[in-house]
Amino acid sequence: MREQQVIESVLRRFEELLPELTLKAHREIAHRTGVADLVLDVQIGDVSRKLVCEVKGVGEPRYLRSAITQLTEALATYPDASPVIIAPYISREGRKLCRDHQVGYIDLTGNIFLRFNHVLIDKSGEGPPPSVKRKYRRLFTPVASRVIRVMLENPERSWTMMRLSAESEVSAYTVYRVFEWLDERGYIEKARGATSLLKPGYLLDLWAENYDFSVNPSRSYYSLAKGFRAFGRQLKELKLPESQRYALTMHSGASLVAPFVRFSDIHLYFEGDPETIVQALDLRPVESGGQVHILTPYDKGVFYNSRRLQDLTVVCNTQLYLDLINYPARGEEQARFLREQEMPF
């Protein structure tokens, strides 16, 4: 979105976005002056305030940092004003960046933070617009998400493009595109030909917000085994050909990593013909009420960094967290505990 379009939109929708304030006057500033983009004179009750605004067509952290620098310079001209960034959409990490630098923000989805005198306006918007959602979908496509998963599983490691390409089993071009997107959002740092992750916690949260567990087709079965321990004993004795593999997830997987809640349902990813494991474990297909759920992985990346615990295979912590966090049966509680106990961010 062009900056002029953002200015026109925020002026047109000012009353809708900020019904608490009265816009008394506004002044656009020519870019050649180098002093901000827009000055707004606003009033709430008997309090008047000047807002000096830097307008950005993109609200990613990389662009917000430059806007914050420009606003710092603008305050020399407007010492009694409040600095504000205006953009079409400002992500959660972008909003935190603004707050950390004591800069207000207004975006066109309704994310607003203004503080001056004794006035505080703090609002959350409706979520990212379609254009931003499309960017998220590109970042978290099955192949691209392999790159993200590898980096989150190795948060302290620095990567060359070719080394990460080999580790994640994707093309160097895919790694390049993922790096490009992460750099725009300020998630990575490049130094001496290698790239490292700066904000793994933010990246995990963003993925969790955009992850849909239902992309893994599932079939439910009834097992004669009484509880997970009995089922686990059967699973330990399972002999699979090299072309097939499984990995536990959800509560059954978490119970072997960071147990926290009681559970009855067992979830496991299986790569290969599911009839192999169905017959070997004597599972009975059911329409409802089954306690064993066999998942067809949306991508082979779900098996990355799987580990053997108590002679059973469990998905990596990143995958475990993603699967659990939005699971209605106490999944969020278990996911939070897993993160506190086993994940360094």
Image (spheres, helix red, strand yellow):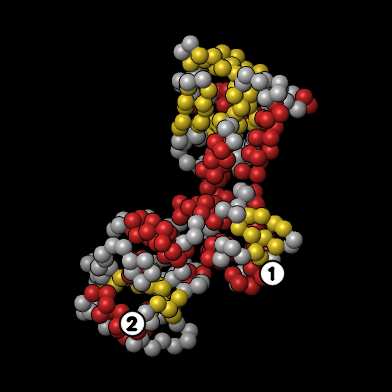
Where is mark 2, residue-wise?
235
- Which image quarter: residue 81? top right
Q: At 51% across and 54% down in the image, what residue appears? A: 201
Q: At 58% across and 32% down in the image, what residue appears? A: 103
- Which image quarter: residue 34? top right
Q: Can residue 342 be seen in this view?
A: yes
Q: Identify the element where label 1 is drawn.
A: helix
Where is mark 1, residue-wise?
162
Q: Residues at badges 1 and 2 in contact (C-beta under 8 Å)? A: no
Q: Is residue 215 visible?
A: no
Label 1 Cα neighbours within 10 Å, binned few <14 / some 14-19 / many ≥20: some
x%, y% of residue 301? 51, 69
Q: How many marks?
A: 2
Q: Which of 127 and 200 is in front in this view?
A: 200
Residue furthest to the right: 32
Q: Tag 2: residue type?
A: Leu
x%, y% of residue 18? 48, 24
x%, y% of residue 12? 56, 23
Q: Identify the element where label 2 is drawn.
A: helix
Q: In this view, does 62 lie above or below 210?
A: above
Q: At 30% across and 57% down in the image, what residue appears? A: 330
Q: Tag 1: residue type?
A: Met
Of labels 1 and 2, earlier in sequence is 1
Q: At 41% across and 58% down in the image, what residue appears? A: 340
Q: Locate residue 173 relative to residue 338 in the image: left or right.
A: right
- Which image quarter: residue 56? top right
Q: Which of 209 and 288 is in front in this view?
A: 209
